[in-house]
Image (cartoon, grey):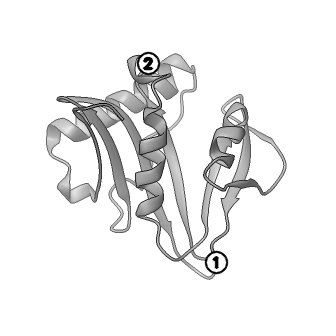
């Protein structure tokens, strides 16, 4: 991480209006426009009490984001998703800091995610293993992955 870069994880209530706007704009810019995947990004899970928003800022600019969901129930796991970097932030190693922070807010349970297939190797560097067959989501190949902690 470079000087002036910071990563925090906060609940929805801690997002001010500008930060929330920047998060949704970044997710739209990358997932909907760049990757050409129109999908219902605002799915209601951002506001859940257990959700944590992992924000990577450099100066005042939001450069990266990840969402951590508390998928409770009988087989309670944490779910990491919406992992994204703004185009100018790519190739600088900043995604590692984003993922380290996301994992830090996932205590005591397995962590799952659906990785875009070309990124399975990067997620494996954090201990994730492929846990099922490859599938298409919005026309993009994904693989389910799990970080076992139990």
Location of residue 114 with respect to 122 vertically, above or below: below
Location of residue 34 with respect to 114 vertically, above or below: above
The answer to the question of whether label 1 and label 2 lie on touching residues, with beta carbons closer than 8 A, is no
Assign a secondary structure to mark 1.
Answer: loop
Residue 50 in percent (x, y) is at 37, 68
Location of residue 76 with respect to 66 vertically, above or below: below
Using the numbered discs, state the Cα–Cα distance from disc 1 to disc 2 in whole angstroms: 36 Å
Q: Residue at x 81, y 43 (%)?
A: 134
Badge 1 or badge 2: first in the primary sequence: 1
Query: How many residues crowd mark 2 within 10 Å: few (<14), some (14–19), many (20+)?
Result: few
Question: Residue 54 — which label?
Answer: none
Which residue in the rendered view is the most extreme toward the right?
133
Residue 76 in percent (x, y) is at 58, 76
Residue 110 in percent (x, y) is at 61, 69
Disc 1: which residue: 75
**1 left or right of 110 in image:** left
**134 left or right of 2 in image:** right
- Which of the two discs, 1 and 2, sits closer to the camera? 2
Residue 29 in percent (x, y) is at 41, 22
Q: Residue at x 47, y 66 (%)?
A: 106
Disc 2: which residue: 87
121 or 3, which is in the foreground? 3
Q: Quadrant of the N terminus?
A: top left
Q: Quadrant of the C terminus?
A: bottom right
Query: How many residues crowd mark 1 within 10 Å: few (<14), some (14–19), many (20+)?
Result: few
147 or 80, which is in the foreground? 147
Q: Residue at x 38, y 34 (%)?
A: 64
Q: Residue at x 56, y 79 (%)?
A: 73
**98 left or right of 111 in image:** left
Q: How many marks?
A: 2
Assign a secondary structure to mark 2.
Answer: helix
């Amino acid at each position: 991480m470079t000087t002036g870069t910071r990563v925090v994880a906060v609940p929805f209530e801690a997002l001010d209006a500008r930060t929330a706007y920047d998060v949704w704009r970044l997710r739209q810019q990358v997932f909907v426009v760049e990757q050409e995947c129109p999908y219902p990004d605002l799915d209601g899970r951002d506001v859940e009490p257990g959700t944590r928003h992992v924000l990577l800022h450099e100066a005042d600019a939001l450069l990266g984001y990840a969402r951590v969901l508390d998928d409770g129930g009988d087989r309670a796991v944490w779910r990491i998703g919406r992992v994204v970097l703004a185009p100018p932030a790519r190739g600088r190693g900043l995604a590692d800091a984003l993922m380290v922070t996301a994992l830090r807010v996932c205590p005591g349970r397995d962590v799952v995610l659906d990785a875009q297939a070309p990124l399975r190797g990067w997620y494996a560097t954090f201990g994730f293993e492929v846990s099922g067959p490859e599938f298409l989501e919005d026309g993009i190949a994904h693989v389910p992955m799990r970080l076992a902690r139990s």
